[in-house]
Amino acid sequence: MSSKVTELHPATHVGNSAASQGTLFVVSSPSGGGKGTLIRRVLEVVPNLSYSVSFTTRAPRQNEVNGREYFFVGLQQFEEMVGGGEFLEWACVHGNFYGTARRQVAEETAAGVDIVLELDVQGAASVRQLLMDSVSIFILPPSFEVLRDRLIARNTDSPEELKVRLRNAPDELRQYSKFDYLIFNDEVERASAQLASIIYAERARCVRQENLVREVIKKFDAAEK
Ligand code: 5GP
């Protein structure tokens, strides 16, 4: 499973004083689709990019650290957070609850930092509906066999959990067309470069740089006087 690495790779600021609000990049795939690896690589190379650490009721796996991969909470605490409106989105995935903390996302984006959300397809749909200018990216595993072998190799799920994840995969795959981008994850190097390219391209959109342009034009106007 993915490792959530915000703490290891804190956002690097690009020194753009006219930075606009940060952008949400939602990355989804079936379990074992390799999104965690791609995200980790991209966080290492793309500056000014952060990672949203979700809350979950799932039990921690070996090597998972509370506050790094997830915030691990009990069902009662999760329900209280839902009741308190603390989640931007939440969903039941493969029998466990997962939710994105509104607060982290709000703080990072307000500071002009882009943030990656690693969500299942339900979460991606919720964010798309809620935030029209978010960017959603679907990671397509090359085959059922590769997906199954990845899940088996990471050795984190019981045979029952593995079955559930594999059984849910086809329905998740069918959601691909609702996403803005699709990355075929047959080769990690190429696929992670493509993910980074999408982030850079989205940053270059005119609408995301209006503050910057306004400041530059202001300087031109001042110079004319
Ligand atoms: P895992 O149990 O393998 O860590 O995660 C299972 C699925 O839940 C993955 O597809 C993962 O991307 C998704 N997930 C993780 N955090 C969240 C979240 O905050 N919201 C939603 N909707 N899905 C999440």
Image (tube, rainbow, N blue to C red):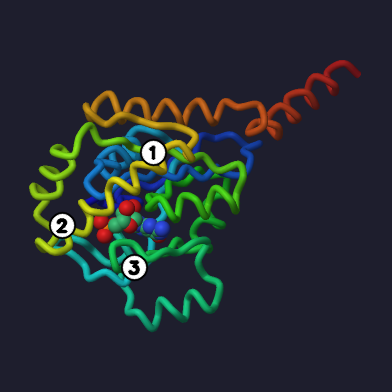
For the C terminus, the quadrant is top right
Query: Residue 60's image quarter?
Result: bottom left
**Label 3 belongs to which residue?**
56
| Location of mark 2 (residue) | 162
Which element type, helix, strand or loop, lies under badge 2? helix
Is the residue at mark 3 in contact range of ligand 1, meaning its CB lies under 8 Å from it? yes
> Mark 1 — residue?
138
Name the amino acid type tagged 2: Leu
Is label 2 or label 1 in front?
2
* Residue ID at (34%, 35%): 42
In what element is the residue under mark 1?
Answer: strand
Residue 2 shown left or right of residue 14 in the figure: left
Answer with mark 2 or mark 1, whichever residue precedes in sequence.
1
Where's residue 43, x and y in %? 35, 40
Disc number lying in front (1 or 3): 1
**What's the distance in space between the residues labelled 3 and 2, CA to CA?**
18 Å
* Frontmost residue, 196 versus 98: 98
Name the side, left or right, on which 152 lies relative to 126: left
Q: Quadrant of residue 33?
A: top left
Whole-percent x, y for residue 20 in the image? 64, 40
